[in-house]
Amino acid sequence: MVQKIINHIVAAVNVPVREYDEYKNMIRYNGDGAKEDVLFHDAEFLDILSSCAEENVPMIYQEMYPIYYGVIRAKGKIYIMGPVNIDFTVTTIQQQPIGRYYAGLHHLPEDKYRISFCEHKNFCEEYLLLFNCLADTDYTYSELCMWSVAKEEVRHNVRAERSRVYFQYQENEKVHNSYDHERREMNSIREGNVEKLKMTLKEVVEGEYAVLSKDSLRSMKNLEIVALAIVARAAIDGGMNPEEAFSINDSYILRVDAAATIEQIGALDYEAKVEYATLVHNLKEHRKENTLVEEAKRIIFRDMHKKIIIKDVAGEIHITPEYLSALFKRAEGITVNDYIMREKVRLSENLLMYSRYSMREISYYFGFCSQSHYGKVFKKWKNMTPGQYRSKYGVREFMED
């Protein structure tokens, strides 16, 4: 069973899983490239990793942001999985590509080392799959995060900060923004009532925004990210497709994070709320009771990174492709295929603006048969090529190596 789990992890996360005895002699290397492995060439780092884990105590080790390892000491053995990069936006360390910097740091014979990307939660869940099996436990992701920091220190700091903030508000006779006002905004979005929302946004409300960072711009960005999460959920409550709502939310958060002024954040806040309210309004007006179309859209969003076959979508909701096409044409005003292509293009815009992925990587990521096909479809919907779009809208820090 343990070996099957290890094989799964190697395939799912694309990282090696090493197995050592208590004296740090390697028993088995699961993965590719054992001779080029970091721990094969850096005995000192192997000592650090192997000594950081206690028996049957989970340990996620951050060597440096964003490079992580998972370490397990159980049943007289030591298991080490990693490294992974948990933040795809970080591609350099000390002005060097991560792979090249890492190779130099650990004395590797090659001038670069390939580090796989995996979201932090996904990496931890795969780690826990192996740890819980070996240690006969049932730790969750949240509990693992708590193990990775000093729990009492965290609790103490939270209580101390809570007391400080409460005292500061009492001392300066401050109050937070009106909850009733926020509730009116969210209800307007749930109802899809754009005019009511705009009237609410014009209200003069007593109170002050919370301070979520010592840097005023960062504080406003943090506040807006929280607000956007609430707005997206209000739109979902109003009937919006969750995948679509969260995709729009992600796009706004990236734009907020790149904002240079508080005014830009305020404009994005207004734009997002009105857009969500408008989308909910359109849903209620034009898609009443059209559950089949919404179900088809859910399937389409789920499979957005594959080649989507209309016959398969229709079959999953037990109708004919012809009937699905007729429903889509009535509800959306476009064919199913055009809807799929339009949404693939829309989702790919974020990668063009906020990543260094090549056009070829993006085209295959969204299931296009070739880069040229992706380019033709993109130009149809945006009146420019993907390269022109990236040159015009791409965030500079992502465009430059």
Image (spheres, helix red, strand yellow):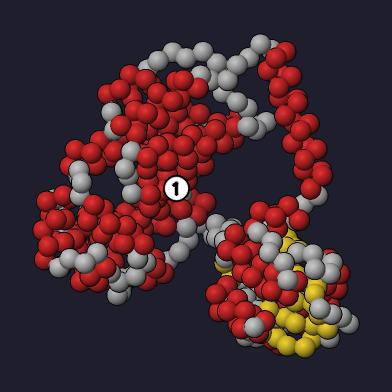
Quadrant into which the C terminus falls? bottom right
Which residue occupies the foreground of this view, 53 or 378? 53
- Location of residue 24 with respect to 163 vertically, above or below: below
At label 1, the amino acid type is Asp
Say whether residue 94 is visible: no
Whether residue 159 is situated above or below residue 334 in the rendered picture:
above
- Res. 242 visible in picture: yes
Q: Residue furthest top?
A: 173
Looking at the rendered structure, the number of numbered marks drawn on it comes to: 1
Residue at the spot 57% in from the left edge and 63% down from the top edge:
122
Image x and y of residue 263, in percent = 46, 27
Determine the secondary structure under disc 1.
Answer: helix
Most distant residue in the right direction: 23
Q: Residue 30, position in %: x, y?
A: 66, 84
Q: Which residue in the structure is indicated by mark 1?
A: 250
**Rendered view: 346 above or below 40:** above
| Residue drawn at the location 47% of the way across and 14% of the way down | 205
- In the picture, measured across the screen, residue 21 lies left or right of residue 230, that is right
Question: In the visual, does 310 lie left or right of 252?
Answer: left
Compare residues 111 and 210 and report the one nearer the observer: 210
Q: Position of residue 340 (x, y in %)?
A: 25, 61
**Closer to the camera, 40 or 333?**
333
Residue 113 image-quadrant placement: bottom right
Could you tell me residue 32's position as x and y percent? 62, 85
Which quadrant holds the N terminus? bottom right
Residue positioned 16% across, 49% down in the render: 331
